[in-house]
Image (cartoon, helix red, strand yellow):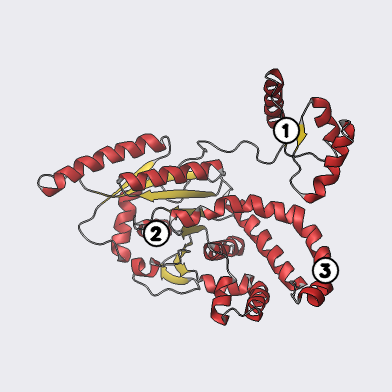
Amino acid sequence: MTPRTILYTGKGGVGKTSVAAATALAIARSGLRTIVMSTDPAHSLSDSLETALGARPAPVADNLWAQEVQAEAEMERHWQAVQRWLGGLLSDRGVDRILAEELTVPPGMDEIFSLLQLKRHHESGEFDVIVVDCAPTGETLRLLSFPEVARWWLEKVFPWEKRLLTAARPLARTVLDLPLPGNDVLAEVQDLVRNLIDMSDILRDRSRSSIRLVMNPERMVIKEAQRTFTYLNLYGYLTDAVVVNRVFPEDVEGGYFSGWREVQREHVELVEQAFAPVPVLRSPFFEQEVVGLRMLERLGRVVFAELEPHELLYRDLSQELGHPREYEHPVVAEAIDRILKICKDHNVPCGHPHPDAKNIERLIASGYRFLMPSTPRSFGVLEQGRKLAGRT
């Protein structure tokens, strides 16, 4: 059975680790084999659970395991050949060895490498539910556009890359004294891209995976959560709940806290309006720090009340990109035709950004005034268009 996957993210410091741990504990108490894993480079899951954790899953309670994924170990597993080649290249050019090693990992890749552990748990079948304590939203959003870029490389670039590099390798070594990457490097990059595409497919499976946003009732935090919510929807990631954490309870009235209570009340109303119809869950500002299993269990009871924390609490996207890169899709084709007609009616030159051998004659006949091929391999199509238009 495909495991249920729940990702928690939010602005740094809002308490997402506590909420993620409380969710995992509540699910485990219901009898489902559950793992909670942290992919945040600044791990705090072990502090929250008051249990020493490492790179491997460790038992924490009945039906509950926890893990703090070490990005360095994942990079060694998936990026070793690339690091060895690129590090050697930089060292040969006089870059300090330690600095060269740091430069071999692109910014933001540590979170991506860490999430590959999610794919392994997903395939292992050991757990019924996987709860992920993600990095703050800025890091998490790096993942959104990557799958589309990765698919493009896999389909367009990789089929040619190996042949081109094989032919150019002797020339680069002789003339430029520059070692081009070997087949092991290319194979490692291709494997990584495929794994990340598979991971994206897991996270976009809206029948089994969802993201939950954690926030405090503060205006700046809410605004960031709103932007994140929009991006998640546009890229096809389901948000099935938002959690407003650290809300002052009703019995905190008078004196210093009276103003804060009123401000928080207004902000909670804003959250309910901004994220409707997605369920808005609340957790209070407890009288003591939420650490340890006892307090996490208490937090889970308050947040979910009568709800089942492992269930999908909402199933629809509020908005999403229509048909990305599907230029022949009827809806997209109709929209393109309408744009072309408007341009013709107002005598405005209209161009097409994706001419190819299959559509070039149709584009010229339709009245496009200029073509915009995106890669050098399309220049032949451009020349063909020039001939069809009588320009040569």
Residue corresponding to mark 3: 168
Badge nearest the viewer, 3 or 2: 3
The quadrant in which residue 324 appears is top right
Mark 1 and mark 2 in contact? Answer it, CB < 8 Å: no
Q: Quadrant of the N terminus?
A: bottom right
Element type where label 3 sits in the image: helix
Residue 109 appears at what percent x and percent y?
A: 56, 63
Q: Is residue 219 left or right of residue 94?
A: left
Residue corresponding to mark 1: 351
The quadrant in which residue 313 appears is top left
The answer to whether any part of residue 122 appears in the image is yes
Taking depth in this image into account, of 31 and 215 the one nearest to the observer is 215
Q: CA distance from mark 1 to mark 3?
A: 36 Å
Element type where label 1 sits in the image: strand
Badge nearest the viewer, 1 or 2: 1
Q: Which mark is residue 122?
A: none
Please, what is the three-letter code of the amino acid marked with disc 3?
Answer: Ala
Element type where label 2 sits in the image: helix
Q: CA distance from mark 3 to mark 2?
A: 59 Å
Indicate which disc, 1 or 2, sits on the residue closer to the N terminus.
Answer: 2
Please, what is the three-letter code of the amino acid marked with disc 1?
Answer: Gly
Residue corresponding to mark 2: 29
